[in-house]
Amino acid sequence: MKICVLVKEVPDAAVEKRIDTSTGRMDRSGEKNLNPYDTHAIEAAMQIREGGVAPVEEIVAVTMGPESAVRALHKAVSLGADRSVHLTDPAVAGSDVAATGYALAQTLQRESPDLVLLGQQSDDGECYTIGAVVAEHLGMPSLTQVIKMNVEGDALRCERQAEYGYDTVQVGLPAVISVGDAINEPRYPSLKAIMGAKKKPLDTVGIGDVGIDAAKVGGDNSAARWVAAKAPPAKAAGEIIEDEDTGETVEKIVAWLDERKLL
Amino acid sequence: MSNILVYALHYEGAINKNSLGAVSEGAKLAAELGGEAHAILLGENVPQDLAASLGKYGAKKVLVAEGPEGLAQPLVDAMAAAIAAGGYSYALFGGGLLGFEIGAGLAARLGAGVAMEVTGVRAENGELIAERPILGDSAISEIKYRSPVGIIIGRLNAFEIRELDPAHPAGDAPVEQLAFELSPHATQAKMLVRGEQRGADVDIEGASILIAGGRGLGKAEGFKLCEDLAGAFGGNTAVAATRAVVDAGWYPYAAQIGQTGKTVAPKLYLAAGISGAIQHKVGMQSSENIVAINKDSNAPIFEFSDLGIVGDLNKILPKLTEAVKAKKDG
Ligand SMILES: Cc1cc2nc3c(=O)[nH]c(=O)nc-3n(C[C@H](O)[C@H](O)[C@H](O)COP(=O)(O)OP(=O)(O)OC[C@H]3O[C@@H](n4cnc5c(N)ncnc54)[C@H](O)[C@@H]3O)c2cc1C
Ligand SMILES: Nc1ncnc2c1ncn2[C@@H]1O[C@H](COP(=O)(O)O)[C@@H](O)[C@H]1O
C-alpha cells in the first residue's frame, strides 16, 4: 500500500495571525511550522505501517505552498514519511479551497496512492474541507473527522463522531481520509530523524509537471472571491482574575455569582 | 431564475434543526433575489409528509432522492443532478458536519466557489454575499461568487428557524422524486453503524447551570471535580463536556456541547480546562453568564467569557466547591 499524507505549512500558533488589509489575504509572514493537525495524519500512516495488517511500501508527504513550505515537508519526513513532493508555483498563489483541492488532486494523481490522509483542519485556513474536494477530483470515497481506522482487506473500517453520535463506516480503498486529532498521540521525531530529514528525496514540481490547468488555479481564477474583511462587532471584555491567592480568588468568584443571583 | 437549493439533513423521522434554519434562511434570501428556495432530502424511503412539512419553513418545492443515508457523496450526486436540471444559483447548508463534506464535494464537482463557517448572508444587487469569521473569529471576511452556482455552508446555529406566519400558512410543499445516479466512488462507502451513543444517557438540556469540563481536567477521573461542584450548586445543575474528552472516552457523548453535540443556553456556564474552540463556542455562546477557568491567559475562551479566572483548576475547583457549599448552607 502507498500512502500520501497532505501536509501544510502554517503560521506558528504562538504568532498572532492577521489579514493584510491591502490584499484581503492572510499575512503569511513570520514564524511557520507544520500544521499540528497534520502530525496526526502522519502518525496514522505510521501506525498502519507498524500495525503490519497491510504492508506499506511508501509514505509520501505532499504539500502545496511557497518555497518556505519545504520545512513542513522536512518535519513530515522526520516524523516518518519516506520522501516528499512539493508543488510550488506562482500560478497557484491565492487559490481558494476548491482550486487548492484541485491542484493537490492533480499532484496526487501522479503518485497513484492507495490512501490519502489529511489533518482535520489547517490551523490558519480552518476550512475542514480540502479532503472532500480532493476526493471528488480523484473519484475516491472519503470521510472526514475519523478517530479510529483499521485496514480490513481492501477497505478501511472508520469511526467518527457526526451530528447524531458515532458512525462506523466501511470505506473501500483507494480512499481519502481526514483524521481527527483524537485518533492518536503523535510521536516526537528522534534527533537522528531530524538530522536525516533533509537527505530524503524531495521532488519539487510546478503546475506543468502535474498537468494543472493554469486557468483553474490562483487568486484570480478562484470562484470564491474574498471582497472585504472587517472587524467583528465589539463585545464588552469580561472581567479577568489572575489566581494568586486561591482563597481570595474563590471569594471573588462567589461574590460575582452571588451578585448575579446564581447561587 | 435565482433559486436556492437547500440541503435538509434528517434522522429518525425528524429534520435537523440547523437544516430548518437553513431552509428558513434560504426562503428569505430567495425572495430577495426573486427566486424560490427548494429543499432536498436523501434517504431510504423518506416519509412524504416529513418532506412536505418543509413548506412551513418556506420551501416552495421539496426534492426527495433515494439513496444511502448519513454519507456525503450520494448527496453530491443528487444535488449535482438537481442543479444540472437548471435554475439554481446557490446551494445552502446549515451547520453540522455532513454539510461541510457535501458542500465541498459539490464545489469540486461543479467548479463552484464555496464559503464555510458562514454566519450571515445578504442579498445585494441580485447576488448573495457570505460573511465568514476567520482567524479565530478576530475578523470577518466577505465572500462573493464568480461561478454560476455559489455554495454556502453555515456555521452551527447561524440561521434562525422561522415558521411562516400561522395566519398565512404555506402548508405543505409539493414533493418531487429526484432521479439521479450514484457515481462509482459514492458506492464505495457503506454505513455500518449510525448514531451510536457512547457513554451514559445523561440529560443536560434542561439544566439551568452547567459545569463543563475539557481536556484540562487531565484524566477521566478529573470530572469528579466538576461533579462535586455541580453537586454543591445542587438543584437544576448538570455536567457537560467538550468533544476532546468525549472522543477520549472520559465522559458521555450525551453531555457534549458544540457543533456535533448539543446547543445550550443555561443561566450559568462554568467552563473548566476548556480552550474555547469555535466548534465548542457555537454550542454555548448564548449562555447568560459564562465563567471560564483556564491556566493559559491566551486561551480563546477568555474572549467570550464574562468572568475569566487564569489559574489551575486543580487548585480552584475544590475550594470553589467548598465555598459554594458554605454559601448555600450559610
Ligand atoms: C468538525 C468538528 C466538529 C467539532 N465538534 C465539537 C463539538 O461538538 N464540541 C466540542 O467541544 N468540540 C468540537 N470540536 C473540537 C474542537 O475543535 C476542539 O478540539 C475541542 O473543543 C477542544 O476541547 P478542549 O477545550 O477540552 O481541549 P483543549 O483545546 O486541549 O483545551 C484544554 C484547555 O485546558 C487548559 N488547561 C490544561 N490544564 C489546566 C489546568 N490544570 N487548569 C486550568 N486549565 C488547564 C489548557 O490551557 C487548554 O486551554 C469539533 C471539531 C471539528 C473539526
Ligand atoms: N496547501 C496545502 N497543501 C497540502 N495539504 C493541505 C493544504 N491545505 C490544506 N491541506 C490539508 O487539508 C487539511 C484540512 O485543511 P483545511 O481544509 O484548510 O482546514 C489539512 O490538515 C492538510 O492535511
Image (cartoon, coloured by chain):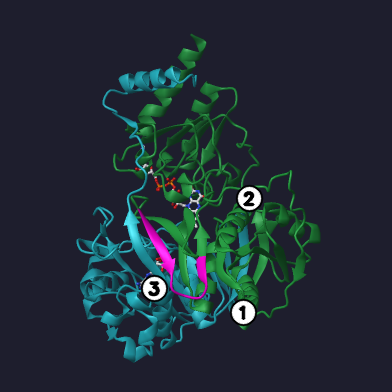
Can residue A89 be seen from the camera position used here?
A: no
Which one is in front in this view, the residue at disc 2 or the one at disc 1? Answer: 1
| Residue, disc 1 | B84
Residue A226 position in % (x across, y down): 36, 65
**Quarter-wise, where is residue B37 in the image?**
bottom right
Is residue B87 magenta-colored? no
Residue at 57% x, 76% y: name it: A141
Dot 3 and dot 1 residues touching (CB under 8 Å): no
Q: Which mark is residue B137?
A: none
- For label 3, being within 8 Å of ligand 2 is answered yes
Q: Which mark is residue B17?
A: 2
Instruction: Pick the residue in front: B293 or A105.
Output: A105
> Mark 2: which secondary structure?
helix
Residue type marked 1: Ala
Above or below residue A240? Residue B18 is: below
* Colour representing chain B: green
* Colour representing chain A: cyan
Q: CA distance from mark 2 to mark 3?
A: 34 Å
Disc 2 crowd rating (10 Å Cα; few below 14, some 14-19, many 20+) is: some
Discs 3 and 1 share one subunit = no
Residue at 38% x, 23% y: name it: A253
Residue type marked 2: Lys
| Mark 2 or mark 1: whose residue is earlier in sequence | 2
User: In terms of secondary structure, what is the magenta stretch mainly?
Assistant: strand
Residue B180 position in % (x across, y down): 69, 78
Chain bearing mark 3? A
Above or below residue B222? Residue A214 is: below
Chain bearing mark 2? B
Discs 2 and 3 share one subunit = no
Highlighted magenta segment, given as a residue range: B140-151
Q: CA distance from mark 2 to mark 1?
A: 28 Å
| Residue, disc 3 | A6
